[in-house]
Image (cartoon, rainbow, N blue to C red):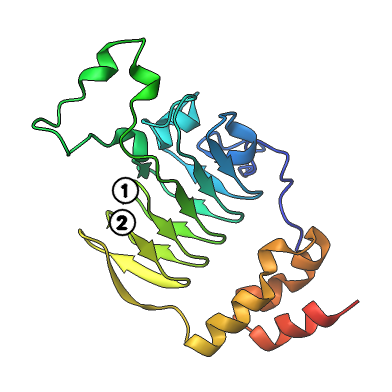
Amino acid sequence: MPLPDPSRRTPITLPDGSDHAGTVFLSQAIDHPRFQVGAFSYASDFDPPEDWASRLAPYLFAFSEETLRIGAFCQIAHGVRFLTSSANHATNGLSCYPFPIFDSQNMEAFQPDTRDTVIGNDVWIGYGALILPGARIGHGAIIGAGAVVRGTVADYAIVTGNPGRVERKRFDEDTIARLLALAWWDWPVSRIEAALPAIMAADVAVLETIARTP
Protein backbone atom coordinates (compact mmCIF):
# COMPACT_ATOMS: atom_id res chain seq x y z
CA MET A 1 0.00 0.00 0.00
CA PRO A 2 1.60 3.29 -1.05
CA LEU A 3 1.59 6.35 1.16
CA PRO A 4 -0.09 9.46 -0.25
CA ASP A 5 2.07 12.02 -1.99
CA PRO A 6 3.28 14.31 0.85
CA SER A 7 3.69 17.21 -1.59
CA ARG A 8 -0.06 17.38 -2.27
CA ARG A 9 -2.09 20.01 -0.47
CA THR A 10 -5.29 17.93 -0.71
CA PRO A 11 -4.24 14.27 -0.41
CA ILE A 12 -7.70 12.65 -0.59
CA THR A 13 -9.23 11.95 -3.99
CA LEU A 14 -12.96 11.22 -3.93
CA PRO A 15 -14.57 8.43 -6.01
CA ASP A 16 -15.65 10.98 -8.63
CA GLY A 17 -12.02 11.98 -9.15
CA SER A 18 -12.22 15.34 -7.39
CA ASP A 19 -9.99 16.46 -4.56
CA HIS A 20 -11.50 16.65 -1.08
CA ALA A 21 -10.84 20.30 -0.16
CA GLY A 22 -11.77 19.70 3.48
CA THR A 23 -8.62 17.70 4.29
CA VAL A 24 -5.13 19.10 3.77
CA PHE A 25 -1.57 18.15 4.48
CA LEU A 26 -0.57 20.99 6.78
CA SER A 27 3.03 21.03 5.58
CA GLN A 28 1.65 22.11 2.20
CA ALA A 29 -1.17 24.35 3.44
CA ILE A 30 0.65 26.42 6.08
CA ASP A 31 3.38 28.99 5.57
CA HIS A 32 3.86 30.59 8.98
CA PRO A 33 7.17 31.37 10.72
CA ARG A 34 5.98 30.16 14.13
CA PHE A 35 4.03 27.07 12.98
CA GLN A 36 6.04 23.92 12.25
CA VAL A 37 4.49 20.66 11.08
CA GLY A 38 5.84 17.31 9.94
CA ALA A 39 5.12 15.34 6.78
CA PHE A 40 1.80 13.52 6.34
CA SER A 41 0.10 15.39 9.20
CA TYR A 42 -3.36 16.49 8.12
CA ALA A 43 -6.26 18.59 9.34
CA SER A 44 -9.90 18.33 8.32
CA ASP A 45 -12.62 20.97 8.40
CA PHE A 46 -16.22 20.98 7.15
CA ASP A 47 -15.73 24.64 6.21
CA PRO A 48 -12.17 24.62 4.88
CA PRO A 49 -10.44 27.97 5.33
CA GLU A 50 -8.03 29.79 3.08
CA ASP A 51 -5.74 30.35 6.07
CA TRP A 52 -5.34 27.06 7.91
CA ALA A 53 -2.80 28.48 10.37
CA SER A 54 -5.23 31.13 11.61
CA ARG A 55 -8.08 28.62 11.80
CA LEU A 56 -6.11 26.16 13.91
CA ALA A 57 -4.05 28.62 15.98
CA PRO A 58 -5.83 32.00 15.92
CA TYR A 59 -3.53 33.64 18.49
CA LEU A 60 -0.26 32.59 16.84
CA PHE A 61 1.15 35.64 15.05
CA ALA A 62 4.23 36.05 12.90
CA PHE A 63 5.76 38.14 15.71
CA SER A 64 4.82 35.71 18.48
CA GLU A 65 7.68 34.48 20.63
CA GLU A 66 6.37 30.91 20.97
CA THR A 67 6.15 28.19 18.37
CA LEU A 68 3.54 25.54 17.65
CA ARG A 69 5.26 22.32 16.63
CA ILE A 70 3.33 19.33 15.31
CA GLY A 71 5.05 16.08 14.41
CA ALA A 72 4.56 13.75 11.45
CA PHE A 73 1.50 11.57 10.73
CA CYS A 74 -0.78 13.56 13.06
CA GLN A 75 -4.53 13.64 12.51
CA ILE A 76 -6.46 16.79 13.43
CA ALA A 77 -10.25 16.78 13.31
CA HIS A 78 -12.74 19.55 12.62
CA GLY A 79 -12.99 22.21 15.30
CA VAL A 80 -9.63 21.61 16.96
CA ARG A 81 -8.01 24.79 18.25
CA PHE A 82 -4.55 25.44 19.62
CA LEU A 83 -4.59 28.34 22.08
CA THR A 84 -0.91 29.20 21.98
CA SER A 85 0.93 31.30 24.54
CA SER A 86 0.26 34.62 22.80
CA ALA A 87 -3.35 34.21 23.94
CA ASN A 88 -2.40 34.43 27.62
CA HIS A 89 -2.76 37.59 29.73
CA ALA A 90 -0.43 38.77 32.48
CA THR A 91 -1.69 37.90 35.95
CA ASN A 92 0.96 39.51 38.14
CA GLY A 93 -0.54 43.02 38.11
CA LEU A 94 -3.68 44.46 39.65
CA SER A 95 -5.55 43.86 36.40
CA CYS A 96 -5.31 41.19 33.72
CA TYR A 97 -6.29 43.75 31.06
CA PRO A 98 -3.67 43.67 28.25
CA PHE A 99 -3.11 47.43 27.99
CA PRO A 100 0.06 47.24 25.81
CA ILE A 101 -1.62 45.42 22.91
CA PHE A 102 -3.49 48.59 22.00
CA ASP A 103 -0.22 50.45 21.44
CA SER A 104 1.46 49.36 18.20
CA GLN A 105 4.86 50.48 19.55
CA ASN A 106 4.65 48.11 22.52
CA MET A 107 2.50 45.29 21.16
CA GLU A 108 5.27 43.02 19.97
CA ALA A 109 7.31 43.42 23.17
CA PHE A 110 4.40 42.41 25.38
CA GLN A 111 4.05 38.67 25.75
CA PRO A 112 3.66 37.42 29.32
CA ASP A 113 3.75 33.74 28.30
CA THR A 114 6.25 32.40 25.77
CA ARG A 115 5.94 28.62 26.20
CA ASP A 116 5.97 26.50 23.05
CA THR A 117 3.18 24.05 22.31
CA VAL A 118 4.55 20.70 21.12
CA ILE A 119 2.62 17.81 19.59
CA GLY A 120 4.47 14.53 19.02
CA ASN A 121 4.26 12.17 16.06
CA ASP A 122 1.23 10.02 15.20
CA VAL A 123 -1.13 11.95 17.47
CA TRP A 124 -4.90 11.90 16.86
CA ILE A 125 -6.69 15.03 18.09
CA GLY A 126 -10.47 14.53 18.02
CA TYR A 127 -13.36 16.77 17.06
CA GLY A 128 -13.46 20.09 18.87
CA ALA A 129 -10.54 19.46 21.21
CA LEU A 130 -8.87 22.51 22.75
CA ILE A 131 -5.12 22.47 23.31
CA LEU A 132 -4.04 25.10 25.85
CA PRO A 133 -0.81 27.17 25.93
CA GLY A 134 2.36 25.22 26.63
CA ALA A 135 0.80 21.78 26.25
CA ARG A 136 3.14 18.96 25.32
CA ILE A 137 1.49 15.89 23.87
CA GLY A 138 3.53 12.72 23.49
CA HIS A 139 3.88 10.41 20.51
CA GLY A 140 0.94 8.19 19.66
CA ALA A 141 -1.49 9.93 22.02
CA ILE A 142 -5.22 10.21 21.40
CA ILE A 143 -7.04 13.38 22.44
CA GLY A 144 -10.77 12.70 22.66
CA ALA A 145 -13.48 14.86 21.11
CA GLY A 146 -14.07 18.03 23.08
CA ALA A 147 -11.19 17.43 25.48
CA VAL A 148 -9.42 20.44 27.00
CA VAL A 149 -5.74 19.64 27.34
CA ARG A 150 -3.02 21.39 29.31
CA GLY A 151 0.36 20.35 30.65
CA THR A 152 2.13 17.17 29.58
CA VAL A 153 0.42 14.15 28.03
CA ALA A 154 2.44 10.94 28.09
CA ASP A 155 3.26 8.92 24.97
CA TYR A 156 0.36 6.72 23.84
CA ALA A 157 -2.04 8.10 26.45
CA ILE A 158 -5.77 8.52 25.76
CA VAL A 159 -7.09 11.81 27.14
CA THR A 160 -10.77 12.77 27.48
CA GLY A 161 -12.89 15.39 29.20
CA ASN A 162 -12.59 18.89 30.63
CA PRO A 163 -10.18 19.12 32.26
CA GLY A 164 -8.47 16.50 30.18
CA ARG A 165 -7.59 13.35 32.09
CA VAL A 166 -5.75 10.23 31.04
CA GLU A 167 -8.27 7.42 30.75
CA ARG A 168 -5.68 4.77 29.98
CA LYS A 169 -2.64 3.98 27.89
CA ARG A 170 -3.10 2.48 24.46
CA PHE A 171 -0.49 -0.22 25.11
CA ASP A 172 1.44 -1.68 28.03
CA GLU A 173 4.68 0.03 29.04
CA ASP A 174 6.91 -2.57 27.36
CA THR A 175 5.12 -2.15 24.04
CA ILE A 176 5.28 1.64 24.33
CA ALA A 177 9.03 1.49 24.95
CA ARG A 178 9.49 -0.73 21.90
CA LEU A 179 7.42 1.61 19.72
CA LEU A 180 9.35 4.65 20.88
CA ALA A 181 12.62 2.87 20.13
CA LEU A 182 11.36 2.04 16.63
CA ALA A 183 10.13 5.61 15.89
CA TRP A 184 8.67 4.32 12.64
CA TRP A 185 7.48 7.82 11.67
CA ASP A 186 11.12 8.76 11.05
CA TRP A 187 11.76 5.89 8.63
CA PRO A 188 12.15 6.39 4.87
CA VAL A 189 8.86 6.31 3.01
CA SER A 190 9.65 2.99 1.32
CA ARG A 191 10.25 1.29 4.68
CA ILE A 192 7.05 2.74 6.16
CA GLU A 193 5.11 1.47 3.15
CA ALA A 194 6.55 -2.02 3.66
CA ALA A 195 5.61 -1.81 7.35
CA LEU A 196 2.01 -0.63 6.90
CA PRO A 197 0.43 -4.11 7.33
CA ALA A 198 2.33 -4.56 10.61
CA ILE A 199 1.46 -1.04 11.78
CA MET A 200 -2.22 -1.53 11.03
CA ALA A 201 -2.23 -4.98 12.66
CA ALA A 202 -0.38 -3.73 15.78
CA ASP A 203 2.33 -6.34 15.18
CA VAL A 204 5.35 -4.84 16.94
CA ALA A 205 7.49 -7.93 16.42
CA VAL A 206 7.15 -7.70 12.63
CA LEU A 207 7.84 -3.97 12.83
CA GLU A 208 11.06 -4.72 14.69
CA THR A 209 12.04 -7.25 12.03
CA ILE A 210 11.48 -4.67 9.29
CA ALA A 211 13.56 -2.16 11.25
CA ARG A 212 16.51 -4.60 11.23
CA THR A 213 16.22 -5.27 7.50
CA PRO A 214 19.04 -3.61 5.51
Mark 1 / mark 2, whichever is N-terminal: 1
Pointer 2 residue = 149
Q: Is residue 89 something one can see in this rendering?
A: yes
Q: Nearer the viewer, residue 86 or 9?
A: 86
Image quadrant occupied by the N terminus: bottom right
Q: Does the residue at mark 1 contact the one at mark 2 (Cβ under 8 Å)?
A: yes
Disc 1 crowd, CA 10 A, few/some/many (<14, 14-19, 20+): some
Q: Is residue 39 left or right of residue 188?
A: left
Marks counted in the figure total 2
| Residue type beneath disc 2 | Val
Q: Is residue 9 left or right of residue 160?
A: right
Residue 45 screen position, x and y as percent = 43, 39
**Tag 2 secondary structure:** strand
Q: Nearer the viewer, residue 178 or 124?
A: 178
| Residue type beneath disc 1 | Leu
Query: Considering only vertical position in the picture, is 209 above or below 50?
Result: below
Q: Is residue 75 left or right of residue 58?
A: right
Disc 2 crowd, CA 10 A, few/some/many (<14, 14-19, 20+): many
Residue 88 screen position, x and y as percent = 27, 37
Measured in 3D between alpha carbons, the distance from the residue under mark 1 to the one under mark 2, in whole angstroms, is: 6 Å
Residue 55 screen position, x and y as percent = 41, 32
Q: Residue at x 44, y 78 (%)?
A: 170
Pointer 1 residue = 132
